Image (cartoon, grey):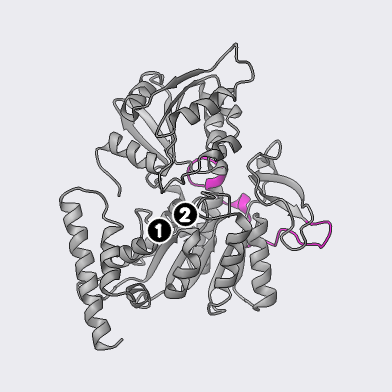
Amino acid sequence: MNFFDRVRLALAVSTAKTVISLINLLRLGAGSVLPGTLAYRIQPKILSLLSRQVKGGIIVIAGTNGKTTTSLLLRQILEQANYRVAHNAAGANLINGLITALSANANFLGTIQADYAILEIDENIIPKAITQLQPKLILCLNLFRDQLDRYGEVDTIGYRWQKSIAELSPETIIILNGDDPTLAYLGERLVKESRWQNVRFFGLTEPDKYLEEMPHAVDAIYCPSCGHPLDYQGFYLSHLGDFDCPSCGFAKPSLAINSQEWTQILIGVYNKYNTLAASVSAQELGINKETILKTINNFQAAFGRAEELEFEGKKVRILLSKNPVGMNETIRAVSDIQQVQGASTTLLVLNDRTPDGTDVSWIWDVDMENLVKLQGTIVVSGDRVYDMALRIYYSQPDLANRVNLIVKEDLQAAIATALETTPSDRTLHIVPTYSAMLEVREILTGRKIL
């Protein structure tokens, strides 16, 4: 690093850290975006200059669903093993958020004292980010349709990922969800075309967790190699499952872990995937199984991801759901709980702001019928409250025997109503999109996240 780069780096990091401190002092949020934006303007090379200082290397976590929960679990595993970890814990996963996280872990001269940096990254900026980060390990969780107005289809993202990863050092450890055909194919191509040695796969080996039928929100049921329809022995979650191609022989790869031997964090099949992803990554970094399991058993949810709170004497669980697959799995988890405990209230909050995606047509790919048949109370709110209300209305098989649907434009009123209709011995499940989740948490906790 030359003298001028060092000076600009110190000035950029000092600026970022000062802004972070002011935001925290004034309780304006987590300060996870603005500091990085300002630092980048002062030193455009800041991301690469900071990342190369991390002793053990950068760990990149990417995927449509599960990034925040998985990265938090992996961080806690590494910290349990006495490593110092930098992490964009607030979930700000664009370039400015990555810069903020690394700056927060540096001193005012721009020097980082961290063994690892775990950075969850928005799937759309992977090609740009990893060229600057040069990561030690890349963990790819899944690829689902999410915000089509921003990202495009699954196969487009998968192609961009493969192309950009192939340009990295072949010593980079690549960990992929083997139950996802797109990611399984990505790994196969890396091995065959780029002669990659460090490709590992995780996934489920539990047929008892198969869905009863193929869900509507399925994105990749055709062979990514030859285009022939895949044969599925069963689906675990959307298009994730046990599959093979009867035409070309492409199939689910061998897994590095037996899922039946591992407990899971939180509720839902999707959190079993998150557990396995973090566990395989930790093992590749040399962490023993005893340390991993100890961390899993003591894990607490990240904000909004099955996070449990108590408000006005009632238990509340927030389940972020921002695409068809995520909401279907949330409904599945809520259904399992209410079938045991009895019907309760569910609050759905739908926004269409930039963090959510401006196209809300995805709610018609959600199996809302599975929520309606629970016969509990459904409260809807958010910027697109009437779109959600209409979706619930048409989910009712018998319009003469309608579900108890309550429409509240005002979110604070919606939360109050949902709490009132929740029995004292039950949990209120709040299912918001991303910006809605931030608003919900601000109301419940009195503090912003961003």
Residue named by callout 2: 67
Camera-side residue of 351 and 316: 351
Label 1 crowding class (10 Å Cα cut-off): few <14, some 14-19, many 20+? many
- The residue at the point 21 percent across, 81 percent down is 7
Q: Where in the figure is residue 281, as x and y percent of width and height?
A: 51, 63
Residue 262 is inside the magenta segment: yes
Q: Where in the figure is residue 93, as x and y percent of width and height?
A: 40, 58
Cα distance in 3D space between marks 1 and 2? 9 Å
Camera-side residue of 269 and 412: 412
Residue 308 is inside the magenta segment: no
- Above or below 209: residue 97: below
Q: Where in the figure is residue 317, as x and y percent of width and height?
A: 41, 34
Magenta region, residue range:
245-271
Camera-side residue of 244 and 379: 379
Secondary structure type for disc 2: helix
Q: Where in the figure is residue 231, as x and y percent of width and height?
A: 78, 50
> Are circles 1 and 2 on residues that touch, CB within 8 Å?
yes
Decide if residue 359 is on the left or right side of residue 42.
right
Camera-side residue of 259 and 412: 412
**Quadrant placement of the N terminus:** bottom left
- Above or below 183: residue 382: above
The reply to whether residue 177 is visible in this rendering is no
Magenta stretch, main secondary structure, is loop
The reply to whether residue 79 is visible in this rendering is yes
The disc placed on residue 154 is none
Q: Amino acid at mark 2?
A: Lys
Residue named by callout 1: 93
Q: Amino acid at mark 1?
A: Asn
